[in-house]
Image (cartoon, rainbow, N blue to C red):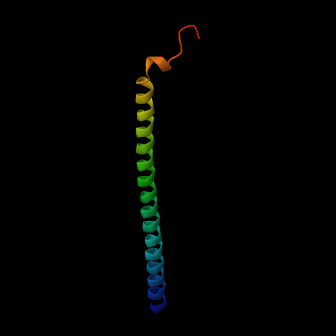
Amino acid sequence: MEQRLVELESRISLAEDLMEEVNLTVYRQQQQIELLQRQLRQLQQQLQDVLAASREQSPREELPPHY
């Protein structure tokens, strides 16, 4: 009976360690996801800015129709 109790305590300890490791991994992945989302928003804004600037290009900068 004593041996069985020791084995169960050992398994519980291992399970707790694994759960802590998984929680840390999930936390790190969430941090990465949030960083990637911020970077994506920045890139989307940059693209919108470039597209808006290209639409606002003055007629003098455009090539004549025969080019």
Decide which of 21, 31 is in the foreground and name it.
31
In-front residue for pair 11/43: 43
Q: Quadrant of the N terminus?
A: bottom left
Q: Going 40% across and 44% down the picture, which residue do you hit?
A: 41
Furthest residue in direction top, as rendered: 66
Q: Look at the image and tell me in which quarter the C terminus lies.
A: top right
Please report the residue visible at 49 percent of the width from the left and 84 percent of the height from the top.
7
Q: Residue furthest bottom?
A: 2
Q: Quadrant of residue 20?
A: bottom left
Q: Residue furthest front?
A: 60
Q: Position of residue 11 (x, y in %)?
A: 47, 79
Q: Position of residue 34 (x, y in %)?
A: 41, 54
- Foreground residue among 45 and 26: 45
Quarter assignment of residue 13 = bottom left
Q: Is residue 30 above or below residue 23?
A: above
Instruction: Give whichever of 8, 39 is nearer the camera.
Output: 39
At x 46%, y 76%, the residue is 17
Q: Quadrant of residue 31?
A: bottom left
Q: In the rendered picture of this protein, how many numbered marks are placed on residues? A: 0
Residue lying farthest to the right in this orientation: 67
The structure residue drawn at horizontal position 44% and vertical position 79%, both measured from the top left corner, is 12
> x, y (%) of residue 27?
42, 63
Residue 65 picture location, percent across and down: 53, 9
